[in-house]
Image: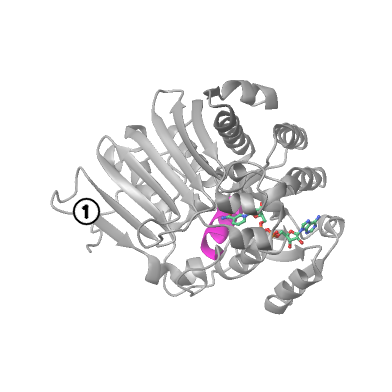
Amino acid sequence: MTHDTHPAAPPPPGAGFIEHIPGTLPLKHPEKHPQAKGVGVLGLHEGRTLLIGMETRCQFVRSVAGCDLSEDKLAASERELPHLFYTPDYDAMLARDDVDIIAIYTPDAMHADHICKAFEAGKDVICTKPLVNSLEHAGRILETGRRTGRRLLVGQSSRFFEPMRRQRRDLERGRYGGLPGIELVDAHYIHRMDWYYRKSPWAASDTDWIFLGMSHPIDLVRWYLGRIREVQAFGVRSAMGQSFGVKGNDIVIANFIAEDGRIGRAMGHYGCHELPTARNCIELMLYGKGGSSLAQYHDMRYIHAGEGDDEMTEITEDHLYAGRHRYFNSEVHGMHYGEFANYADHFGQALIEGRDASPGLEEGVETFCVMEAVRRASRGGAPVEVMPLLKEVGVE
Ligand SMILES: NC(=O)c1ccc[n+]([C@@H]2O[C@H](COP(=O)([O-])OP(=O)(O)OC[C@H]3O[C@@H](n4cnc5c(N)ncnc54)[C@H](O)[C@@H]3O)[C@@H](O)[C@H]2O)c1
């Protein structure tokens, strides 16, 4: 294994997704910015990870409140962070002046109602992926967001994982031909989900794996290819999915062509035996004019080679052990502490500086429309154009 010794070139003007990457070892509790935004978290399973992540890793946001209908979930968060405000009543959290941002981690089908309530209460919003899971919901949050003028960030966690951040930073700096040099994008999220159906039965009945799971690879493909023109897809239901009564398809492959003619593909499988040593559950492979790169979740590796590198070497950056404190709370693999904290800080900083942060509301709705195109194509077999869906929900 080799290490990256490339000198860091200064970022080009206007690049801006990742301006700096914090140190990984040991976990430093950064000092809070004087205008750090107060965050109230709704839904304290995945949301508890964010409460802890913000407390220990963020400069621009602070944890102030948690809300869940479940007394057990409230108690579990309260044991770790006893100084916060806890309630089972969303309205009580919305009424608080110290809550600037509502972060939403409820089941997929509830996101739209919870987002609109937050916007109407004058709050900005972080919403976990998938932003929404129906066209009607997409149109509604877009209309409410525009009318109230509130800002939103979609918690697309895989964009904010260390290897994906470094991969993006290198391209923003022009390495391997830069972002415009990307010619093919290949992403997947493959994960056995029997444990998830047992924990969260709504996953089988009230959403679709193209939203719940494939929001990761589809967002990654769209992030690099820009606006998608057309989608082809096939989908089937696994034996495991059928045994849990899954409504949609849980095995899906999709091909994309962008407005500018570049192409990509995404794959999802949620009822399989995994081979995690051979293939990480989320991988983003980018083939560019000047080089290729692979970013991996869970193993936290970024592998790359191309123009400007030693031609006898593929470079593997391995962040797993050095980065485990920040990303996995000192376990080697675990919950999403680091990624959630990264995107919350990214949003908090943008709000303080009066900027939009990506992926924002319009971009999130656009990704939803691409997912919906995949869902339709995977059922009917015929290609589906994205533009009519964008028009239907009101994206320019
Ligand atoms: N990588 C990621 O970013 C990531 C990972 C896992 C899940 N998610 C997303 O996070 C969301 C939640 O997933 P989860 O696994 O935590 O689900 P979950 O079913 O374990 O938890 C949902 C929680 O929401 C609470 N809840 C439901 N309705 C509520 C209401 N009206 N008011 C207050 N609390 C309410 C429930 O009591 C429950 O504790 C989903 O949208 C999922 O897609 C994102």
Q: Residue at x 24, y 38 (%)?
A: 290
Classify the position of the N terminus by image quarter.
bottom left
Q: Residue at x 47, y 45 (%)?
A: 17
**Closer-to-camera residue (314/39):** 314
Span of residues in magenta = 337-349
The stretch drawn in magenta includes residue 204: no
Location of residue 83 with respect to 224 vertically, above or below: below
Q: In the picture provided, is 229 more to the left or to the right than 186? A: right
Q: In the picture provided, is 358 more to the left or to the right than 51? A: left
Q: How many marks?
A: 1
Q: Which residue is mark 1?
A: 314
- Does any portion of residue 227 appear in the rendered image? no
Query: How far from the left and from the top, in percent, is residue 222?
Result: 49, 36
- Does any portion of residue 339 appear in the rendered image? yes
Q: Is mark 1 within 8 Å of ligand 1?
A: no
**Which image quadrant shows ligand 1?**
bottom right
Coloring applied to the structure? one colour
Q: Main secondary structure of the magenta part?
A: helix
Classify the position of the C terminus by image quarter.
top right
Location of residue 184 with respect to 293 vertically, above or below: above
User: Which amino acid lies under the numbered mark 1 shown in the image of this protein?
Assistant: Glu
Query: How far from the left and from the top, in percent, is residue 357?
Result: 57, 44
**Closer-to-camera residue (164/271):** 271
Element under label 1? loop
**Closer-to-camera residue (21/318):** 318
Q: Residues within 10 Å of mark 1 (few under 14, many from 20)?
A: some
Q: Residue at x 47, y 56 (%)?
A: 161
**Closer-to-camera residue (246/305):** 246
Q: Farthest residue in the left direction?
A: 312
Query: How far from the left and from the top, in percent, is residue 52?
Result: 62, 69
Query: How far from the left and from the top, in percent, is residue 352?
Result: 62, 51
